[in-house]
Image: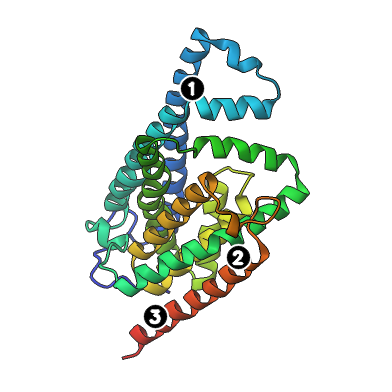
Amino acid sequence: MRQLPGVPLDGSWERPGRNPLIASIAGLVICGGVYSTLGGTVSGIIAALDMLRDPSWLSTGRLVDILVEYYRRFQVPILVVTTVAQFAVFFALAVVLVRRWHSSRPFRYLSYRPPAAVDLVLAGAGAVAIVPLAEVVNRWSYLVLPPLRELAAGEAALLAVRTPWQAVLVFGAVAVTPAVCEETLFRGWLQGTLRRKLAVVPAIIVQAVLFALFHMSPLSIVALAVVGLYLGWLFERTGTISASMTAHGLYNATIIAVTNVLPRWLADASGDFSLPVIGGSLAAFVIVLALVELGARRRATP
Protein backbone atom coordinates (compact mmCIF):
# COMPACT_ATOMS: atom_id res chain seq x y z
CA MET A 1 0.00 0.00 0.00
CA ARG A 2 1.17 3.51 -0.74
CA GLN A 3 2.28 5.83 2.04
CA LEU A 4 1.97 9.61 1.81
CA PRO A 5 4.87 11.08 3.79
CA GLY A 6 4.54 14.79 4.45
CA VAL A 7 0.89 14.88 3.35
CA PRO A 8 -1.56 15.83 6.11
CA LEU A 9 -4.73 13.71 5.85
CA ASP A 10 -7.05 16.21 7.50
CA GLY A 11 -10.01 16.29 5.08
CA SER A 12 -13.61 15.38 5.83
CA TRP A 13 -13.22 11.88 4.32
CA GLU A 14 -10.12 11.15 6.39
CA ARG A 15 -12.08 10.25 9.48
CA PRO A 16 -12.48 6.87 11.20
CA GLY A 17 -15.08 4.78 9.41
CA ARG A 18 -14.91 6.75 6.15
CA ASN A 19 -13.25 5.15 3.13
CA PRO A 20 -11.21 7.57 0.99
CA LEU A 21 -11.74 5.31 -2.05
CA ILE A 22 -15.41 6.22 -2.04
CA ALA A 23 -14.45 9.89 -2.16
CA SER A 24 -12.23 9.39 -5.23
CA ILE A 25 -14.92 7.44 -7.10
CA ALA A 26 -17.56 10.01 -6.09
CA GLY A 27 -15.24 12.77 -7.29
CA LEU A 28 -14.82 11.03 -10.64
CA VAL A 29 -18.59 10.75 -11.04
CA ILE A 30 -19.17 14.36 -10.00
CA CYS A 31 -16.47 15.75 -12.27
CA GLY A 32 -17.64 13.60 -15.17
CA GLY A 33 -21.24 14.70 -14.73
CA VAL A 34 -20.41 18.38 -14.44
CA TYR A 35 -18.04 18.25 -17.40
CA SER A 36 -20.52 16.42 -19.66
CA THR A 37 -23.35 18.76 -18.71
CA LEU A 38 -21.29 21.92 -19.13
CA GLY A 39 -19.60 20.92 -22.37
CA GLY A 40 -22.69 19.35 -23.90
CA THR A 41 -24.91 22.31 -23.07
CA VAL A 42 -22.59 24.97 -24.45
CA SER A 43 -21.69 22.99 -27.59
CA GLY A 44 -25.35 22.12 -28.13
CA ILE A 45 -26.43 25.75 -27.93
CA ILE A 46 -23.76 26.79 -30.43
CA ALA A 47 -24.73 24.00 -32.84
CA ALA A 48 -28.45 24.74 -32.46
CA LEU A 49 -27.97 28.44 -33.23
CA ASP A 50 -25.96 27.57 -36.33
CA MET A 51 -28.60 25.06 -37.47
CA LEU A 52 -31.27 27.76 -37.22
CA ARG A 53 -29.13 29.95 -39.43
CA ASP A 54 -28.12 27.29 -41.95
CA PRO A 55 -29.64 23.79 -41.61
CA SER A 56 -28.39 22.65 -45.02
CA TRP A 57 -25.37 20.80 -43.64
CA LEU A 58 -27.69 18.33 -41.88
CA SER A 59 -28.74 16.95 -45.26
CA THR A 60 -25.21 16.09 -46.39
CA GLY A 61 -25.95 12.33 -46.50
CA ARG A 62 -25.11 9.54 -44.08
CA LEU A 63 -24.76 9.94 -40.34
CA VAL A 64 -20.98 9.58 -40.70
CA ASP A 65 -20.90 12.45 -43.19
CA ILE A 66 -22.97 14.64 -40.86
CA LEU A 67 -20.61 13.82 -37.98
CA VAL A 68 -17.54 14.77 -40.03
CA GLU A 69 -19.22 18.01 -41.11
CA TYR A 70 -20.19 18.74 -37.49
CA TYR A 71 -16.58 18.48 -36.31
CA ARG A 72 -15.36 20.51 -39.27
CA ARG A 73 -17.86 23.34 -38.77
CA PHE A 74 -17.58 23.52 -35.00
CA GLN A 75 -13.95 22.60 -34.47
CA VAL A 76 -13.01 25.93 -32.86
CA PRO A 77 -15.94 26.19 -30.38
CA ILE A 78 -15.65 22.50 -29.48
CA LEU A 79 -11.95 22.81 -28.69
CA VAL A 80 -12.38 26.08 -26.79
CA VAL A 81 -15.25 24.68 -24.71
CA THR A 82 -13.24 21.50 -24.08
CA THR A 83 -10.24 23.47 -22.83
CA VAL A 84 -12.24 25.74 -20.52
CA ALA A 85 -14.39 22.89 -19.18
CA GLN A 86 -11.44 20.59 -18.47
CA PHE A 87 -9.48 23.23 -16.58
CA ALA A 88 -12.60 24.30 -14.67
CA VAL A 89 -13.75 20.79 -13.77
CA PHE A 90 -10.99 18.18 -14.07
CA PHE A 91 -8.37 20.51 -12.60
CA ALA A 92 -9.90 23.31 -10.49
CA LEU A 93 -12.91 21.39 -9.14
CA ALA A 94 -10.80 18.28 -8.55
CA VAL A 95 -8.21 20.26 -6.56
CA VAL A 96 -10.98 21.89 -4.48
CA LEU A 97 -12.54 18.51 -3.70
CA VAL A 98 -9.18 16.95 -2.82
CA ARG A 99 -8.48 19.84 -0.47
CA ARG A 100 -11.90 19.51 1.16
CA TRP A 101 -12.08 15.72 1.35
CA HIS A 102 -8.49 14.56 1.75
CA SER A 103 -5.76 17.07 2.55
CA SER A 104 -5.08 20.74 3.17
CA ARG A 105 -2.04 20.24 0.89
CA PRO A 106 -3.87 19.08 -2.26
CA PHE A 107 -0.93 19.35 -4.66
CA ARG A 108 1.22 17.19 -2.42
CA TYR A 109 -1.62 14.68 -2.22
CA LEU A 110 -1.83 14.71 -6.03
CA SER A 111 1.94 14.02 -6.28
CA TYR A 112 2.97 17.33 -7.82
CA ARG A 113 6.64 16.66 -7.08
CA PRO A 114 9.77 17.81 -8.95
CA PRO A 115 10.59 15.18 -11.58
CA ALA A 116 13.95 13.79 -12.59
CA ALA A 117 14.86 14.96 -16.08
CA VAL A 118 15.60 11.40 -17.22
CA ASP A 119 12.11 10.31 -16.16
CA LEU A 120 10.53 13.00 -18.33
CA VAL A 121 12.67 12.04 -21.33
CA LEU A 122 11.86 8.35 -20.96
CA ALA A 123 8.17 9.04 -20.34
CA GLY A 124 7.96 11.08 -23.53
CA ALA A 125 9.90 8.51 -25.56
CA GLY A 126 7.58 5.76 -24.39
CA ALA A 127 4.53 7.85 -25.27
CA VAL A 128 5.71 8.35 -28.84
CA ALA A 129 6.64 4.67 -29.16
CA ILE A 130 3.23 3.46 -27.99
CA VAL A 131 1.31 5.35 -30.71
CA PRO A 132 1.87 2.71 -33.46
CA LEU A 133 1.04 -0.03 -30.95
CA ALA A 134 -2.24 1.71 -30.07
CA GLU A 135 -2.98 2.00 -33.80
CA VAL A 136 -2.58 -1.78 -34.13
CA VAL A 137 -5.15 -2.24 -31.36
CA ASN A 138 -7.50 0.08 -33.24
CA ARG A 139 -7.03 -2.02 -36.40
CA TRP A 140 -8.41 -5.02 -34.54
CA SER A 141 -11.45 -3.04 -33.44
CA TYR A 142 -12.01 -1.99 -37.06
CA LEU A 143 -12.03 -5.67 -38.08
CA VAL A 144 -14.69 -6.44 -35.48
CA LEU A 145 -16.73 -3.29 -36.20
CA PRO A 146 -15.86 -1.94 -39.69
CA PRO A 147 -18.01 1.25 -39.32
CA LEU A 148 -15.55 2.46 -36.67
CA ARG A 149 -12.97 3.16 -39.39
CA GLU A 150 -15.41 5.54 -41.08
CA LEU A 151 -16.25 7.22 -37.79
CA ALA A 152 -12.53 7.89 -37.33
CA ALA A 153 -12.90 10.49 -40.07
CA GLY A 154 -14.84 12.63 -37.59
CA GLU A 155 -11.94 12.59 -35.14
CA ALA A 156 -9.57 13.47 -37.98
CA ALA A 157 -11.73 16.51 -38.83
CA LEU A 158 -11.56 17.67 -35.22
CA LEU A 159 -7.75 17.36 -35.21
CA ALA A 160 -7.21 18.94 -38.62
CA VAL A 161 -4.54 21.67 -38.72
CA ARG A 162 -4.32 24.10 -41.65
CA THR A 163 -3.03 27.36 -40.13
CA PRO A 164 -0.55 28.25 -37.34
CA TRP A 165 -3.34 29.55 -35.07
CA GLN A 166 -5.34 26.38 -35.68
CA ALA A 167 -2.26 24.37 -34.70
CA VAL A 168 -1.96 26.30 -31.43
CA LEU A 169 -5.63 25.65 -30.65
CA VAL A 170 -5.57 21.95 -31.53
CA PHE A 171 -2.33 21.16 -29.69
CA GLY A 172 -3.39 23.27 -26.71
CA ALA A 173 -6.84 21.71 -26.41
CA VAL A 174 -6.01 18.12 -27.30
CA ALA A 175 -2.43 17.69 -26.02
CA VAL A 176 -1.69 20.20 -23.24
CA THR A 177 -5.11 20.44 -21.61
CA PRO A 178 -5.75 16.70 -21.10
CA ALA A 179 -2.15 16.20 -19.98
CA VAL A 180 -2.67 18.61 -17.10
CA CYS A 181 -6.33 18.08 -16.28
CA GLU A 182 -6.95 14.37 -16.90
CA GLU A 183 -3.73 13.40 -15.15
CA THR A 184 -4.76 15.42 -12.11
CA LEU A 185 -8.09 13.59 -12.00
CA PHE A 186 -7.12 10.03 -12.94
CA ARG A 187 -3.53 9.51 -11.87
CA GLY A 188 -3.14 12.13 -9.15
CA TRP A 189 -6.47 11.71 -7.42
CA LEU A 190 -8.00 8.38 -8.49
CA GLN A 191 -4.90 6.21 -8.71
CA GLY A 192 -3.18 7.97 -5.82
CA THR A 193 -6.16 7.18 -3.57
CA LEU A 194 -6.59 3.64 -4.91
CA ARG A 195 -2.97 2.93 -4.00
CA ARG A 196 -3.65 3.78 -0.39
CA LYS A 197 -5.86 0.69 -0.14
CA LEU A 198 -4.95 -1.52 -3.11
CA ALA A 199 -1.79 -3.18 -4.39
CA VAL A 200 0.03 -1.77 -7.42
CA VAL A 201 -1.45 -3.98 -10.16
CA PRO A 202 -5.14 -3.76 -9.17
CA ALA A 203 -4.89 0.02 -8.70
CA ILE A 204 -3.31 0.55 -12.13
CA ILE A 205 -5.82 -1.73 -13.86
CA VAL A 206 -8.85 -0.11 -12.21
CA GLN A 207 -7.80 3.43 -13.11
CA ALA A 208 -6.93 2.39 -16.68
CA VAL A 209 -10.34 0.80 -17.25
CA LEU A 210 -12.15 3.80 -15.78
CA PHE A 211 -9.94 6.14 -17.84
CA ALA A 212 -10.93 4.32 -21.06
CA LEU A 213 -14.65 4.13 -20.20
CA PHE A 214 -14.69 7.78 -19.12
CA HIS A 215 -13.87 8.93 -22.66
CA MET A 216 -16.96 7.17 -24.06
CA SER A 217 -15.11 6.61 -27.35
CA PRO A 218 -15.87 3.27 -29.04
CA LEU A 219 -13.23 4.19 -31.63
CA SER A 220 -10.35 3.71 -29.25
CA ILE A 221 -11.58 2.30 -25.95
CA VAL A 222 -9.09 -0.60 -25.92
CA ALA A 223 -6.20 1.63 -27.01
CA LEU A 224 -7.13 4.13 -24.29
CA ALA A 225 -7.03 1.35 -21.70
CA VAL A 226 -3.54 0.36 -22.90
CA VAL A 227 -2.38 3.98 -22.70
CA GLY A 228 -3.99 4.27 -19.26
CA LEU A 229 -1.97 1.27 -18.09
CA TYR A 230 1.23 2.93 -19.30
CA LEU A 231 0.39 6.27 -17.69
CA GLY A 232 -0.58 4.59 -14.42
CA TRP A 233 2.62 2.56 -14.40
CA LEU A 234 4.70 5.69 -15.05
CA PHE A 235 2.97 7.49 -12.19
CA GLU A 236 3.65 4.57 -9.87
CA ARG A 237 7.28 4.02 -10.80
CA THR A 238 8.39 7.67 -10.95
CA GLY A 239 6.37 8.90 -7.97
CA THR A 240 5.44 12.15 -9.68
CA ILE A 241 2.51 13.21 -11.82
CA SER A 242 4.89 15.19 -14.04
CA ALA A 243 6.02 12.01 -15.81
CA SER A 244 2.50 10.88 -16.72
CA MET A 245 1.60 14.45 -17.75
CA THR A 246 4.58 14.54 -20.11
CA ALA A 247 3.70 11.16 -21.59
CA HIS A 248 0.01 12.03 -21.96
CA GLY A 249 0.77 15.32 -23.70
CA LEU A 250 3.31 13.82 -26.12
CA TYR A 251 1.05 10.85 -26.91
CA ASN A 252 -1.80 13.15 -27.90
CA ALA A 253 0.56 15.48 -29.76
CA THR A 254 1.90 12.54 -31.76
CA ILE A 255 -1.67 11.49 -32.62
CA ILE A 256 -2.34 15.02 -33.91
CA ALA A 257 0.87 15.05 -35.96
CA VAL A 258 0.20 11.61 -37.44
CA THR A 259 -3.40 12.52 -38.27
CA ASN A 260 -2.28 15.56 -40.23
CA VAL A 261 1.04 14.40 -41.70
CA LEU A 262 2.00 10.73 -41.85
CA PRO A 263 5.34 10.44 -43.73
CA ARG A 264 5.35 7.79 -46.44
CA TRP A 265 8.31 6.03 -44.90
CA LEU A 266 6.22 5.33 -41.79
CA ALA A 267 3.17 3.97 -43.59
CA ASP A 268 2.27 0.93 -45.67
CA ALA A 269 0.09 0.84 -48.79
CA SER A 270 -3.12 1.16 -46.73
CA GLY A 271 -1.92 4.33 -45.02
CA ASP A 272 -1.43 2.66 -41.63
CA PHE A 273 1.87 2.24 -39.81
CA SER A 274 4.09 -0.30 -41.54
CA LEU A 275 5.19 -3.52 -39.83
CA PRO A 276 8.84 -2.38 -39.44
CA VAL A 277 7.65 0.81 -37.72
CA ILE A 278 5.37 -1.19 -35.41
CA GLY A 279 8.18 -3.62 -34.60
CA GLY A 280 10.64 -0.81 -33.92
CA SER A 281 8.11 0.97 -31.72
CA LEU A 282 7.56 -2.19 -29.71
CA ALA A 283 11.29 -2.61 -29.17
CA ALA A 284 11.70 1.05 -28.18
CA PHE A 285 8.75 0.81 -25.79
CA VAL A 286 10.18 -2.27 -24.06
CA ILE A 287 13.54 -0.49 -23.65
CA VAL A 288 11.80 2.54 -22.11
CA LEU A 289 9.91 0.31 -19.66
CA ALA A 290 13.13 -1.40 -18.65
CA LEU A 291 15.00 1.89 -18.11
CA VAL A 292 12.18 3.44 -16.07
CA GLU A 293 11.95 0.30 -13.95
CA LEU A 294 15.73 0.30 -13.43
CA GLY A 295 15.61 3.92 -12.30
CA ALA A 296 12.75 3.21 -9.90
CA ARG A 297 14.63 0.32 -8.31
CA ARG A 298 17.75 2.40 -7.91
CA ARG A 299 15.77 5.08 -6.11
CA ALA A 300 14.23 2.44 -3.85
CA THR A 301 17.65 1.08 -2.84
CA PRO A 302 18.81 2.60 0.48
- Location of residue 67 by image quarter: top right
Q: Residue at position x 46%, y 51% from top?
A: 252
Q: Residue 296 has which mark? A: 3
254 to 169, vertically: above or below: below
Mark closest to the chain's N terminus, 3 or 2: 2
Specify the amino acid type for callout 1.
Answer: Gly
Do the residues under discs 3 and 2 have CB atoms within 8 angstroms? no
Q: CA distance from mark 3 to mark 1?
A: 46 Å
How many C-alpha atoms fall within 10 Å of the one at disc 2: few (<14), some, or many (≥20)? some
Residue hosting label 2: 277
What numbered label is drawn on residue 44? 1
- In the picture, the quarter occupied by the C terminus is bottom left
Q: Residue furthest bottom?
A: 302
**Res 197 seen here:** no
Amino acid type at image mark 2: Val
From what the image shows, is residue 38 above or below residue 198? above
Q: Earlier in the sequence, mark 3 or mark 1?
A: 1
Between tags 1 and 2, which lies in front? 2
| Residue 186 horizontal/vertical position (percent) | 43, 55
Please report the residue visible at 56 percent of the width from the left and 39 percent of the height from the top.
Answer: 155
